[in-house]
Amino acid sequence: MATCVCLLYLFLFSTCWLTVSMSETLLLPLTHAFSKTHFTTPHHLLKTTSARSAARFRHRHKQVPLPLSSGSDYTLSFTLGSPPSPTISLYLDTGSDVVWLPCSPFECILCESKAPPLSPPLNLSASATAVPCKSSACSAAHSSLPSSDLCAMARCPLDAIETSDCNSFPCPPFYYAYGDGSLIARLYKDSLTLPNSLSVQNFTFGCAHTTLAEPVGVAGFGFGRLSLPAQLSSVSPQLGNRFSYCLVSHSFDSDKVRRPSPLILGRNEEKEKQFGNEVVEFVYTDMLHNPKHPYFYSVGLEGISVGKRNIPAPENLKKVDRRGSGGMVVDSGTTFTMLPSNLYDSVVNEFDHRVGRFNERASAVEETTGLGPCYYYDKVAKVPVISLHFVGNGSRVVLPRRNYFYEFLDGGDGIGKKRNVGCLMLMNGGDEEELSGGPGATLGNYQQQGFEVVYDLEKRKIGFARRKCSSLWDSFKN
């Protein structure tokens, strides 16, 4: 039986109705945007993905603090309006804080090399209304600019500004920039309906008619008043204050990629430990506040183990300073983990010391994939275990082999000899000077496969637990 609750919209100063079943948690499917038809060879696939991971990481260290590049690997779908729109698919992005989508008529400048749109541009429904200039939502979209300034920009008369009577004047268009693209959008409110029939009235989103290199909209899950979790938590705290996802392990296998990865809103802290007859233990680490990039989920990294050798992380990865430098961002949108060059070199040297003695280095593969070190091997390559050590209470996360060592058949083009090859799936993010003013490292989604990752926004901590993500999906569905 459904229940309707009317609450004051704490963040957005508007009235909101939430329709939701009595279940404590809500399960949503995340779809992987990858399709093997986009790539002709494993080399092309890895080169494209590694280049995008590097660009996403490095663009965030510009002089102006920007969210991550909006491209992602996982999409979330919903409908808007009454009657409901066609299904809208957006990138899930824990590195930004606004929900926006392309609206008709839509123009994307410099999008020739980008992925095609996931859904047609939205035609606003008759139920959509513009957000007024005198609202906290408008202020949030304009970097906390005072509402009086925003209403002046909207051409509200002075006497109306002084008497706070500008509700008929819409919020001015806002500019939102990512690391490698940007957009101009207007704020609207409308009903949002998720696949499990959760309906949120007066949901605030950006409607963009023009973008630069951004053909696909974004569901921002980062810290911020306009993010999807924040809007849910303002009307139903148990849904928005804790969420998790569990990315199905795929290793770029097209059959596994098609399986849904569960996104769980309102993850229950006690029940998350029970998984069938199995008790699952989470490893938690505290979130770090980043004053320059407040929408990031940053954590402290103590070090990385390669086999039995523990390699300490530089001090800047253990904390975030007042300039926004340091820490590791847990990111749903970056594919491969990016490390500062000094730590990356130490990890690679130790890995190569253990693997390179017994296997031939595949230098040609490294050049064509952008990854390394890579090795040829005959039957099974023996590689050391890699573990991540986070700050606090011995928080150690042991990565499965497939999360950091990608194995494929080289020479399948019919020209060269076919050989087994494997590559380390970590990347060099640059030296500390290059990384100044931004995160020191990023934990990519490829390394998060096979883990349930819990974001506890109330207690400001992130947890990791090994899961069979496809079975977790089935357990919730049943």
Image (tube, helix red, strand yellow):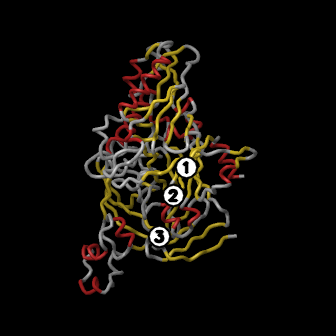
Q: CA distance from mark 2 to mark 1?
A: 20 Å
| First in residue order: circle 3 vs circle 2 | 3
| Residue 451: quadrant of the picture | top right
Residue 393 vs 380, above or below: the answer is below
Type of amino acid under label 2: Leu
| Picture coordinates of residue 113, whole percent (x, y) | 34, 41
Residue 145 vs 397, above or below: the answer is below
| First in residue order: circle 1 vs circle 3 | 1
Residue annotated with mark 3: 190
Q: Is residue 73 visible?
A: yes
Residue drawn at x 40%, y 30% is: 344
Type of amino acid under label 3: Asp
Say which element carries label 1. Answer: strand
Residue annotated with mark 1: 30
| Picture coordinates of residue 166, whole percent (x, y) | 32, 81
| Picture coordinates of residue 258, whole percent (x, y) | 57, 41
Type of amino acid under label 1: Leu
